[in-house]
Amino acid sequence: ADGSVTIISSETTVPEGSSLTLTCTYTGIDELFAIRWTNNGNGSGRKYDITIKQPEPCTIFGKPGLNETLFTYTCLTLTILNVTRDNQNDNFTCQANLNINSENSVIVSVSVAGITLSGNGTSGGFTVGENASLQMTCSTSKDVQYVTYVKRVNGSHQTITAVGYGPSSCATDPEPPSYLSCSCVSRREFVCVIRNVNRAMNGDIWLCTLPGAGTISGDKTIVIEVAGITLSGNGTSGGFTVGENASLQMTCSTSKDVQYVTYVKRVNGSHQTITAVGYGPSSCATDPEPPSYLSCSCVSRREFVCVIRNVNRAMNGDIWLCTLPGAGTISGDKTIVIEDDTQNPEISAPSVFTVIEGQEFINTECKSNCWPDCTYRWINSSSNTVIAANFTLFFHTVTRYFTGNYTCVSTNNATRDKTESKIYILVQYAPDVTVIGSNATSMDIQTQLRCSARGNPDIYTYKWQQKWPNSILTRNWTLHGYSVLNLTDLSYEHSGRFTCFASNGVPHFPDMNTYRSSSTFMFVKDVPVVVSPKTTNSGPYMIFTNLKETVELNITVFSNNGLISMTISTIHDHKNLTSFRTIDEIIQLPVFGTTVPSKGYLISITFYLGDTSDFTAYNVVFTNEIGSVFFAVEIKQKETSESSIGPLIGGVTG
């Protein structure tokens, strides 16, 4: 199909309740026989279609999707008579001859009038004094015909009256209640006035609505300001706490002018009227006549005074209050309290009290002289927590966490005055001990073990002990009093469990030991150690034998970090010099000046002496992952003078 279609709107933004005209324009060579209008909705799907049959006189083709009372039309226009907020963002298009769609669309923008309700009460609200007037103003953001004043009753709307412009002037419908008068200020402002707000209206909820649109103002709640009343005294801190035989001035103050107030005593939960004080026909008066101990006067219509001339102990605990006439408004209770000097409580312990952790803490009592009586509390001053609600402080078993300041608070039950005394509890305890160390090797210059002690008092003596692994063999290090143990010239003998003993002189419960300990295991990797045969620093190990003989040398070796390797060297080249074998064996290892059984190696070396050049020095080298050790051997030919000496230690056979 040839041709084009466009759609235009009569308004960019349509006021709610106004009409909107859409125009569809067709350009083409074919004869126009139909225009279809489509409301594609605002995102929730198509709303309706209206097809107009062409040419003049144009008529509706088929059944329209919109009630015919809601729109009018011409051949090329469609007018929506009453646009509502439901039309917001409706997307309209048109189509010519049922097959040529408009190249654009019209999206409806609806302008909605807003409405607010305000009052002339406190801060422009609905808080007013009893019997005052309340002006309620409905204001709209656009010109409107009328507004409706509504009360919300039990969650439902109750129409009171509609206020607006009739055929000739401002009018109301229905007639407002007798307490209400209404008027029109402009088409954007309407007023209703409650002439006398009474207590029955307290809590009434009012709002305004606009016609037809469902637009409502926010709720406004009437709050009645009623005259308040307070009772104060001239005692301590403006209260009713006074000394015996002193005078007590009781002042009733109101927030608004009143005729009179009534002084009342609360006796066994009931009110007992003492006297009413206020303005009579000519001057201030009382009714009934007050008791002889009481004299009363009027200061103003907002302040009235009664004075007890001599407060005695029999009045201690009397409860007084004031009331206003008719309204049921009463002041808060005030209780007469006779002041009594309360001394600081005495504690049955020294100000600094030292105990040892684990002991049972003897009862510590706190007492004070006061009238009529006192209550007591013990408070942990560090945590500000109550730990006893009586005068006795008791700990069944003392722990270090009880150290701190403790306060005994004595409270006079009559005056509520508080006095206090303090005690400092010092808990001494044996130290908690930890040891820190690390493994080392004999190649290290030194290693350290550190002992940490935490106790009270924080002064310690230290002892160190080493235990050989898997043995009862121990040695004590003579370095006393130091928390750090420095070890030098490291060897395998420095392996084992090291224990630090620390003491601050305080016994530990329940064993009563003054030394506490902690241990750590340290392993020192060492080079191989030749256990036997023994050599001297003066030279190599000597073997004497004869030419053509075979000599067997047995060497025991210890290595605490894995297998060892062995090499033998000499200054001569001997092809058939030696042979050897290695056997795992339990050896006697020197430890702490004695020997202990330990896993080691037996190395048997066989020397073949076939030539005089075999009588020479040999260097046997044992190696593990840490390093090597050298064992020097020298073989000499026997001489007559030496033949009786025999082999040295190490098991040499020939």
Image (tube, grey):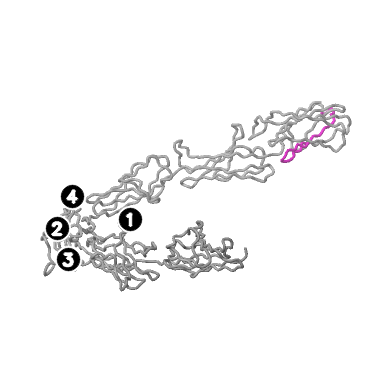
Quarter placement of the C terminus? top right
Name the element at disc 4.
loop
For disc 3, the marked residue is 259
Which of 495 and 552 lies nearest the eye of the viewer? 495
The magenta stretch spans residue 158:
no
Task: Please name the amino acid that badge 4 sits on.
Answer: Asn
Q: Residue at x 18, y 52 (%)?
A: 270
- Can the viewer see residue 255 in this picture? no
The quarter of the picture where residue 567 lies is: top right
Question: CB atoms at circles 4 and 3 under 8 Å apart?
Answer: no
Check disc 4: other Cα within 10 Å, few if <14, some if 14-19, many if 20+: few
For disc 1, the marked residue is 155
In the image, the segment drawn in magenta is 620-642
For disc 4, the marked residue is 268
- The image shows residue 389 at horizontal and vertical percentages of 31, 46
Quarter placement of the N terminus? bottom right
Q: Would you say the magenta stretch is mainly helix, strand or loop?
A: strand
For disc 2, the marked residue is 274
Among numbered discs 4 and 2, the one appearing first in the sequence: 4
Name the element at disc 3.
loop
Report how far apart the C-alphas of labels 1 and 4 lie in the structure. Answer: 43 Å
